Image: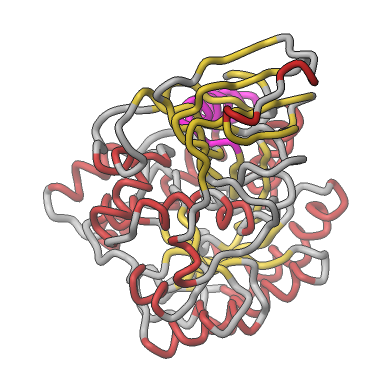
């Protein structure tokens, strides 16, 4: 691949010599270089620095990009999505506007079970083609690494179909992709009164095939009242761990579910959502190696309480930001909107949200050695903004697409 030189960068953002998961106040430390250059070779970051130190004669440059007036930063690392689904659910959106609750919508066949019905009726090719279009869309909006969950199959055939689609996306896309098995998303209707029967199906019928075909990197459970209890969550996660699938848990979205506590006890990679947090849950997270992944566009869409980002930061928690892209509660994979809402509604600083959505998001997918910062030897996954006056303008001007172009693994999208 030809070498590319990017010159006259107004500000090169997210520069790091070494990887470090950022906790608490460290999230506000965002290293940058003004009036910078960046050299990309073979899809990787080869060098960078101030323009005055550029010695172009020492390198053979085939391509050049003038980034005058532009900010250049690492691509977004979206560590929680449900990007593979068969159909949208805007009819439920109307039901919500008319005052129906989540429980009422679910009772008439809506919610996760609605998505499961549509997914099981779709072919693998149909699911792949729809997911590919969504993947291309989010990449143009700046996402360079993404986690994708199953969970709309809720049957052996459906879950495996989803995971095979994700595997195919991994093989064909330039994005860094991680797959998570979320068979424990809810109980299928046929197991409504037989929870142990479905748990046995997950453990004895799904997991062995997933392991044999290497279909997942992680295992996830929706730990919530009315879904999977703490005890059930622990059983399922430990079963996944026996196949080297590290847990990533849906926790504390609708109630104080205990998901944070069980996640920390299992050394889960992340506990995600965290809309409802007690002091005990925050302290538990702070004293663990588990990352708290916040999903503000889900709270925005549901009009529920936002995660207590400032409290989490003050207690020195490690937090990441992700989109929760799914058809029911966050039908958007736009990480720029996630970043803006995190500032506007959760009072995070621009530097904090960028770190949480890049390097910490990379850590939440165990991709920190490959992406998430401007570091020599990492993939050239890079966002070029349009000409903007300051970094704070990104979340400030939330209604405008400020992405000029995106580079994934050294190639412009």
At 67% from the left and 72% from the top, the residue drawn is: 236
333 part of magenta stretch? no
Question: How far across and how far down the image is residue 359, in percent?
Answer: 58, 53
Is residue 141 found inside the magenta-colored segment of the image?
Answer: yes
The residue at the far bottom in this view is 280
Query: Which residue appears at 37% of the width and 79% of the height?
Result: 277
> Residue most toward the left?
98
Image quarter where the N terminus lies is top right
* Front residue of 15 and 138: 15
Where's residue 409, x and y in %?
69, 29
**Does residue 82 appear in this view?**
no
Q: Which image quadrant for residue 262?
A: bottom right
Q: Is residue 3 left or right of residue 112?
A: right
Q: Main secondary structure of the magenta part?
A: helix
**Residue at the image position 30 percent from the left and 57 percent from the top:** 299
- Is 300 left or right of 49, judged from the image as shown? left
| Residue 60 left/right relative to 394 | right
Where is residue 239? Give x, y as percent: 75, 72
**Span shown in magenta:** 122-144
How many numbered circles are shown? 0
Q: Is residue 261 above or below residue 80?
A: below
> Residue 196 or 226: which is nearer the viewer?
226
Farthest residue in the right direction?
A: 212
């Amino acid at each position: 691949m030809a070498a590319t030189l990017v010159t006259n960068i107004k500000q090169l953002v997210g520069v790091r010599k070494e990887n470090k998961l950022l906790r608490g106040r460290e999230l506000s430390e965002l290293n940058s270089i003004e009036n910078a250059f960046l050299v990309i070779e073979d899809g990787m970051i080869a060098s960078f620095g101030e323009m005055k130190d550029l010695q172009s004669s020492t390198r053979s440059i085939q391509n050049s990009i003038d980034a005058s007036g532009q900010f250049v930063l690492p691509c977004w690392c979206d560590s929680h999505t449900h990007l593979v689904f068969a159909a949208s659910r805007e009819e439920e959106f109307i039901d919500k506007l008319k005052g129906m609750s989540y429980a009422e919508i679910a009772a008439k066949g809506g919610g996760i079970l609605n998505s499961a019905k549509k997914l099981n009726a779709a072919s693998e090719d149909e699911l792949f083609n729809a997911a590919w279009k969504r993947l291309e869309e989010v990449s143009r909006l700046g996402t360079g690494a993404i986690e994708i969950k199953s969970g709309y199959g809720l049957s052996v055939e459906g879950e495996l179909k989803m995971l095979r689609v994700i595997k195919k996306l991994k093989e064909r896309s330039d994005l860094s992709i991680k797959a998570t098995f979320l068979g424990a998303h809810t109980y299928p209707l046929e197991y409504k009164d037989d929870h142990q029967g479905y748990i046995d199906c997950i453990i004895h019928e799904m997991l062995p095939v997933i392991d044999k075909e290497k279909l997942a990197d992680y295992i996830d459970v929706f730990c919530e009242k009315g879904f999977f209890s703490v005890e059930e969550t622990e059983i399922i996660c430990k079963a996944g761990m026996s196949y080297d699938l590290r847990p990533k848990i849906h926790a504390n979205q609708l109630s104080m579910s205990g998901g944070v506590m069980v996640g920390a006890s299992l050394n889960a990679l992340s506990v995600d959502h965290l809309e409802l947090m007690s002091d005990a849950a925050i302290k538990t997270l702070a004293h663990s190696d588990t990352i708290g992944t916040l999903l503000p566009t889900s709270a925005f869409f549901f009009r529920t309480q936002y995660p207590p980002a400032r409290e989490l930061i003050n207690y020195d928690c490690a937090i990441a930001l992700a989109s929760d892209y799914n058809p029911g509660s966050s039908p958007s994979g736009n990480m720029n909107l996630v970043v803006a809402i995190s500032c506007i509604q959760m009072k995070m600083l621009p530097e904090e949200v960028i770190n949480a959505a890049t390097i910490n998001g990379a850590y939440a997918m165990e991709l920190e050695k490959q992406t998430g910062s401007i570091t020599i030897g990492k993939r050239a996954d890079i966002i070029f903004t349009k000409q903007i006056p300051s970094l704070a303008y990104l979340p400030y001007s939330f209604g405008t697409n400020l992405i000029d172009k995106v580079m994934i693994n050294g190639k412009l999208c």
